[in-house]
């Protein structure tokens, strides 16, 4: 993690990293996503499913090796290791597909949903410690006015509960009249956002009727914190050994073999 990235993440609670995916990685990922979306429910392999509104595609990361390889992408692999003090666990990865028919989501964060004790954010000895964080990889361009991701920069460090009177109680529907303190993050295809789950975030409704907003949401936490994986056995069996190890629960003193690698290539 560079000093610039560390500073920006610490003050904002999220980091926009442009041009994470190469043209070939983006093309391969899009191809895999389109195959998942086009496969009828009764023909999906065991462990894969989509929500009734066709927004959430479970275990999207595991549908194809082009997507699975992204969980250890070299651009953010050093960030994953720093946040967990070299004790990472990958918990799950979901493909989200937004259309103009899907509504917005309220502002939320882990602390509001599960209590202040549920996760932590800390800085010590020149590095960041972040118990629960997500990486959003974008496969489509998002332009101002389209909708999409909302964040409240710096809210991961809030020492007070968010008043219900603030930000329309978290229900934000109009980008043209965003409350002061709320930012609509627009990204290009191939970009990524790294975000602590303590950051207040939500989404505006996706406006374009001729374009989709497709993102892969990858979630990580320390390997010794609770149950790290929500992935079922049929999905786990199709994964590379490196991914299986990364998903494993382990003692806080143990350093996984995959973590010792500067660059991880799936076998």
Image (cartoon, grey):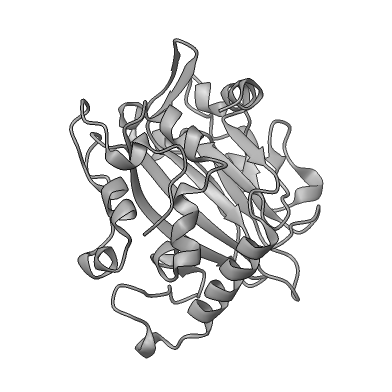
Along the line of sight, which residue is nearer the eye, 152 or 9?
9
Location of residue 174 with respect to 123 vertically, above or below? below
Quarter of the picture holding the C terminus: bottom left
The quadrant of the rendering that contains the N terminus is top right
Looking at the image, residue 93 lies above or below residue 58 = above
Residue sitting farthest toward the top: 125
Image coordinates for residue 162, horizontal then vertical, percent: 52, 29
Q: Farthest residue to the left: give it.
A: 251
Front position in the image: 261 or 20: 261
Would residue 137 be found to the left or right of residue 189 on screen? left
The number of callouts visible is: 0
State the residue in front, 112 or 42: 42
Residue at image location 45% in from the left, 51% down from the top: 71
- Asked if residue 159 lies left or right of residue 202, the reply is left
Residue drawn at 52 percent across, 80 percent down: 35
The x and y percentages for residue 196 are: 49, 35
| Quarter where residue 252 is shown | top left
Q: In terms of image quadrants, where is residue 119?
A: top left
Residue 85, image x, y percentages: 37, 25
Query: How far across and down, in percent of the image, does residue 131 sit?
Result: 37, 31
Q: Which residue is painted at 74% across and 52% down in the image?
A: 174
For the point 21% across and 30% down, which residue is it? 254
Question: Relative to residue 111, is residue 206 depicted above or below?
Answer: below
**Which of the two residues, 32 or 54, is positioned nearer the viewer here?**
32
């Amino acid at each position: 993690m560079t000093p610039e990235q560390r500073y920006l993440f610490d003050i904002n609670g999220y980091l926009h990293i442009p041009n994470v995916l190469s043209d070939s990685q983006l093309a391969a990922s899009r191809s895999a996503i389109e195959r998942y979306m086009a496969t009828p429910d009764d023909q999906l392999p065991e462990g894969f499913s989509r929500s009734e509104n066709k927004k959430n595609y479970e275990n999207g990361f595991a549908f194809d090796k082009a997507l699975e390889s992204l969980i250890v992408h070299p651009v953010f692999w050093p960030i994953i290791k720093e946040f967990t003090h070299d004790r990472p666990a990958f918990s799950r990865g979901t493909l989200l597909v937004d259309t103009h028919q899907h509504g917005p989501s309220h502002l939320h964060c882990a602390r509001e949903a599960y209590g202040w004790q549920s996760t932590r954010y800390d800085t010590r000895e020149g590095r960041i410690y972040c118990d629960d964080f997500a990486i959003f990889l974008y496969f489509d361009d998002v332009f101002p006015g389209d909708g999409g991701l909302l964040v409240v920069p710096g809210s991961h460090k809030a020492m007070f509960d968010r008043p219900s009177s603030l930000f329309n109680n978290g229900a934000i529907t109009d980008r043209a009249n965003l409350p002061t303190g709320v930012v609509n993050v627009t990204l290009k295809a191939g970009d990524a956002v790294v975000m602590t789950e303590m950051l207040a975030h939500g989404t505006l409704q996706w406006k374009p009727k001729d374009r989709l907003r497709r993102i892969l949401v990858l979630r990580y936490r320390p390997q010794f914190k609770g149950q790290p994986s929500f992935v079922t056995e049929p999905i786990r069996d199709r994964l590379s050994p490196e991914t299986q190890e990364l998903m494993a629960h382990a003692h806080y003193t143990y350093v996984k073999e995959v973590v010792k690698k500067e660059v991880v290539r799936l076998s």
